[in-house]
Amino acid sequence: MAEQKQDARVPTVVADDLHIVYRVNGAKTGKGSATAALSRIIKRGEERGVRKVHAVRGVSFVAYRGEAIGLIGSNGSGKSTLLRAIAGLLPAEQGKVYTDGQPSLLGVNAALMNDLTGERNVILGGLAMGMSREEIKERYQDIVDFSGINEKGDFITLPMRTYSSGMAARLRFSIAAAKDHDVLMIDEALATGDRKFQKRSEDRIRELRKEAGTVFLVSHNNKSIRDTCNRVLWLERGELRMDGPTDEVLKEYEKFTGK
């Protein structure tokens, strides 16, 4: 028991004063305007016609094995950007992200191709996550059953482009959840599907935590966060406004949003 307690405090993700800046090309510069020309002269060193968007501002936290961490905040608060930075898909403008093991961002590692069948995508998605063909074969039927996409027909043999967005999201989650992850990041996957699928997803997240993984969940559904996560990070305008136990943070967030 003491050993299990010690494992629970092993860091898996460390964000240290993390800043992420997007550069948007083709920003309006007011060409021909004297004010805009002066502004361009003053902003020496900045690319002409490029607007900078500071999406994550000085975020610091440590995530540990066995935690399920909810990410909440208004639209555009930096939640998805933070996940992409943890996954190594976005470079830091300032600060660092350290990870123990390979982070998996749902929908990226299991990249699905619209022109291929669901069956082929299960195989490719599994391979992309580092599973062997034998492992995929063993877990194939469980993945299909978990997704529920065959409940109303043999959809797994049809091209992905024939799927609804909900069906595609459920299959994506099912492929990602078939493997034990060091760090699994889920962006709004539980918002798709009926309550039965959400319940299966929440149960699977708890299993992943027991396997000493760390799960990050972005969701606008506070009930999913309450049912699944033991800790919450609240972002607003790219800044970490609050970090703590789920009930405490959601209580403050709900006061802030009036919901």
Image (cartoon, rainbow, N blue to C red):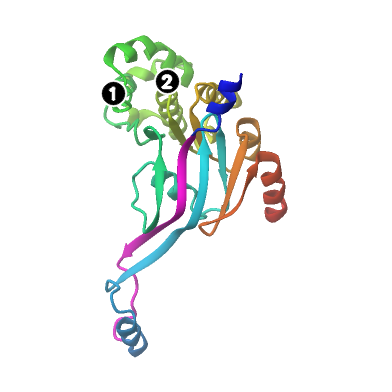
Work out whether residue 157 or residue 209 is closer to the camera in this orientation and state it. Answer: 209
Residue visible at 43% across and 29% down in the picture: 182
Q: Position of residue 63 (x, y in %)?
A: 52, 39
Quadrant of residue 142 within the rendered picture:
top left
SS at badge 2:
loop
Q: Is residue 188 left or right of residue 2?
A: left
Return the disc, 1 or 2, that comes first in the chain's sequence.
1
**Residue 259 seen from this side:** no
Q: Amino acid at mark 2?
A: Ala
Horizontal and vertical percent position of residue 146: 48, 18
Residue at the (48%, 58%) spot, across then down: 58
How far apart are the alpha carbons under marks 1 and 2?
A: 12 Å
Q: Give the residue at mark 1.
A: 127
Q: Where in the figure is residue 198, as x and y percent of width and height?
A: 57, 27
Q: Is residue 24 magenta?
A: yes
Tell me the magenta residue range. 11-32
Is 127 left, or right, of 99 in this rendering?
Answer: left
Q: Residue 76: horizontal and vertical position, in percent?
A: 50, 55
- Name the residue furthest front: 2
Q: Secondary structure at mark 1?
A: helix
| Residue type at numbered disc 1 | Leu
Residue 43 lies left or right of residue 209; in this view the side is left
Query: Relative to residue 184, is residue 259 depicted above or below?
Result: below
Q: On residue 113, which mark appears? A: none
Q: Which residue is mark 2?
A: 178
Return the residue nearer the eye: 9 or 211: 9
Magenta stretch, main secondary structure, is strand
The answer to whether residue 31 shows anywhere in this view is yes
In the image, what residue occupies the spot 34% across and 73% down? 28
